[in-house]
Image (tube, grey):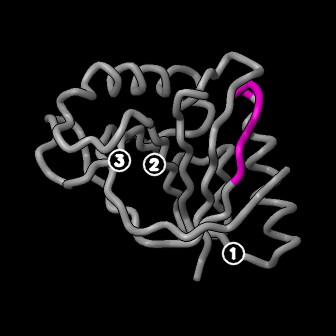
């Protein structure tokens, strides 16, 4: 799997936040939030583009397991100005940071294998330490039920 380290400037996102396990999120909450976000996207006045981001914010305790513990999911859009959001949406600030990035290719239901590689083998091999969040970019290549699906993953790294 091809990975690279990139540094991104700080940015803001606006969207819907929910606390859930991966299983709960994938069992229907994701689709409900996604549909709601798409339905209300034109109400986001300062939306930068049409790429949906899935921000995943993890607790910082050592025994956290993303596969079984609840954590914060934010389905959102990047915004140029962090104001004027529709009711029920949140604004989240993402600090400037370095990330390891790679592209998951294939069914979205198999994305766990890509995360296992990055959070397991890649981190072990490189000695980098993850920060407590990552995000996915769902652009025109996002076709969750197709083998042609592509999702860019960004895992935040500690400085």
In this view of the protein, which residue sits in the foreground, 119 or 84?
84
Which residue has dot 2 on it? 72
- In the picture, measured across the screen, residue 41 lies left or right of residue 11, that is left
Give yes or no for contact between labels 2 and 3 (Cβ–Cβ under 8 Å): no
Give yes or no for contact between labels 2 and 1 (Cβ–Cβ under 8 Å): no
In this view of the protein, which residue sits in the foreground, 97 or 27?
97
Whole-percent x, y for residue 83 in the image: 14, 51
Q: Which structural element holds mark 2?
A: strand
Within 10 Å of disc 3 (Cα), the crowding (few <14, some 14-19, many 20+) is many
Judged by depth in the image, the label closer to the viewer, 1 or 3, is 3
Q: Which structural element holds mark 1?
A: loop
Judged by depth in the image, the label closer to the viewer, 2 or 1, is 1
Give yes or no for contact between labels 1 and 3 (Cβ–Cβ under 8 Å): no
Which residue has dot 1 on it? 129
Q: Residue at x 81, y 53 (%)?
A: 2
Residue 140 in view in this figure: yes
Which residue has dot 3 on it? 78
- In the picture, measured across the screen, residue 97 lies left or right of residue 106, that is left
Give the Cα separation between the discs numbered 1 and 3. Answer: 25 Å
Q: Earlier in the sequence, mark 2 or mark 3?
A: 2
Whole-percent x, y for residue 15 in the image: 31, 40
């Amino acid at each position: 799997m091809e990975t690279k380290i990139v540094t991104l400037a700080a940015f803001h996102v606006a969207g819907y936040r929910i606390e859930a396990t991966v299983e709960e999120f994938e069992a229907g909450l994701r689709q409900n939030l996604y549909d709601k976000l798409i339905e209300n996207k034109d109400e986001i006045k300062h939306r930068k583009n049409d790429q949906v981001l899935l921000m995943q914010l993890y607790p910082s305790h050592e025994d956290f397991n993303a596969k079984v513990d609840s954590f914060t999911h934010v389905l959102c859009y990047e915004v140029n100005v962090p104001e004027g959001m529709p009711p029920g949406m949140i604004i989240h600030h993402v600090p400037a940071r370095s990330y390891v990035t790679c592209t998951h290719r294939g069914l979205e239901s198999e994305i766990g294998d890509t995360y296992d590689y990055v959070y397991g083998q890649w981190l072990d091999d490189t000695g980098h330490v993850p920060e407590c969040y990552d995000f996915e970019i769902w652009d025109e290549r996002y076709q969750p039920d197709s083998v042609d699906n592509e999702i860019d993953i960004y895992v935040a790294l500690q400085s």
